[in-house]
Structures are given as structure tokens and as C-alpha cells.
Amino acid sequence: MVQARLLAYRTEDHKTGVRAVIWAEGKSRSCEGTGAMYFIGCGYNTFPVGSEYADFPHMDDKQKDREIRKFRYIIHAEQNALTFRCQEIKQKRSMIFVTKCPCDECIPLIKGAGIKQIHAGDVDAGKKKADVSYMRFGELEGVSKFTWQLNPSGAYGLEQNEPRRRENGVLRALPGSEEQYRKKLCLGKPSEDLSTLQ
């Protein structure tokens, strides 16, 4: 996930700034020194290859109009990572680390490529923002899904029934136990071993 966050400096869409890195388990003859993992590819959201920053209409006085126009032209990080990968994704344990929840356009591409795990950096699953929908992420089957947070020791889940408190005018959930946190972190099948998340 750190490697995905470093790609932030390459993106041409600094407001959204999505980055993706694909890794797989196993040894690769071309990559030494990476242990049991090898690099497949990486990408970030940007305009199409060969275009200039000013080629596409995305500047406007109104923020909403700017976002709607920009989304039509931006190539998603997951799409770039899959398109410009340096190796084929074989039917083995492969994973993609994405700094935001994959959208409905990218989910079928990820599954079709044979990726077995998705590690997402936020919890937009089940939401719709502007022209981008994240509804398919929660419904995806056959792929393990995890959300990644920068500070898991202070993380908590927010559900409708949980007690809340105000802190400097901001509504926050009361932190739950660590066991409760681990159950919410893993979006995969409940039978999966959660010890890998610790």
C-alpha cells in the first residue's frame, strides 16, 4: 500500500489521486530480492497516454461540473495497472492494492484479469459519488476484499446503531474492541483466517 501511495506524485488528477499496484505470490526469475512476492504492474489515474494536461476540458468555475467532465476522460488507476503490467497474471495468488475502493467500471476488469485479492484504501463501497458508482465492490464474489487504513490501532467502524460522540463539533463513533475492528476490516468470506490482518 505504501508503494501505491507513492504513485500519488505521478497522477494528473490530484483531487481524486487514485493509485494501484499489482503483486503476486511466488518466485519470478526476473525479480530477485523481493522474497515470496513479485511485481506485476502499477498505475495511477491520468489522462490517456500521449495527451497533454490541457487537451481535455476539465477546468470550470463550478466544482461539480468540473468533476463530471473530468471523469469522462480520466483513465482509472486499476485500468492503467492492468493495461501496462509487465507480466501476465497467472492463476495463483495475485493481489491489487488500490488507494480508493475500485469503481463499478474496474471491478469486472480486476476479476477478469484473475486477481484474487483486492486491498482498498477506503470504504466507498456501496456509495455513488458524482458519476462514479462503487456498488459492485460489496457484491463481488470469488475475490477476497480488504480495506486498508493508515492507523488501524485507532480505527473503528461506524454503523447506524452505534453510539456516537461529538469532538470539536465533528460527529464520531465510539471506538469498539479490536476484535470488532478486525471483523469489519475483512470484507471477504467470514470463514477466512483473520490472523493475516494483524
Image (cartoon, rainbow, N blue to C red):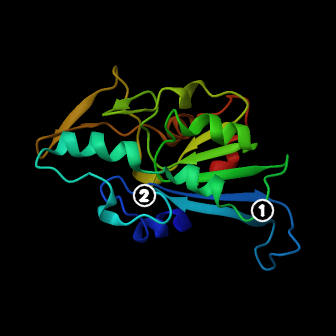
Residue visible at 69% across and 51% down in the picture? 95
Residue visible at 65% across and 42% down in the picture? 110
Residue 132: give x, y in percent of width and height: 39, 35
Write down the quadrant of residue 52 in the picture: bottom left
Residue 101: give x, y in percent of width and height: 48, 42
Question: In the image, 68: left or right of 114?
Answer: left
* Residue kind at label 2, given as amino acid type: Phe
Residue 41: give x, y in percent of width and height: 66, 62
For disc 2, the marked residue is: 47
Question: In the image, 48: left or right of 146?
Answer: left
Element assignment for label 1: loop
Residue visible at 55% across and 32% down in the picture? 137
Q: Is residue 59 above or below residue 188?
A: below
For disc 1, the marked residue is: 87
Taking depth in this image into account, of 22 and 131 the one nearest to the observer is 131
Report the mark closest to the observer, 2 or 1: 2
Residue 94: give x, y in percent of width and height: 75, 51
For label 1, the crowd category at 10 Å Cα-Cα, with few meaning under 14, some 14 to 19 and many 20 or more, is few
Q: Residue furthest bottom?
A: 33
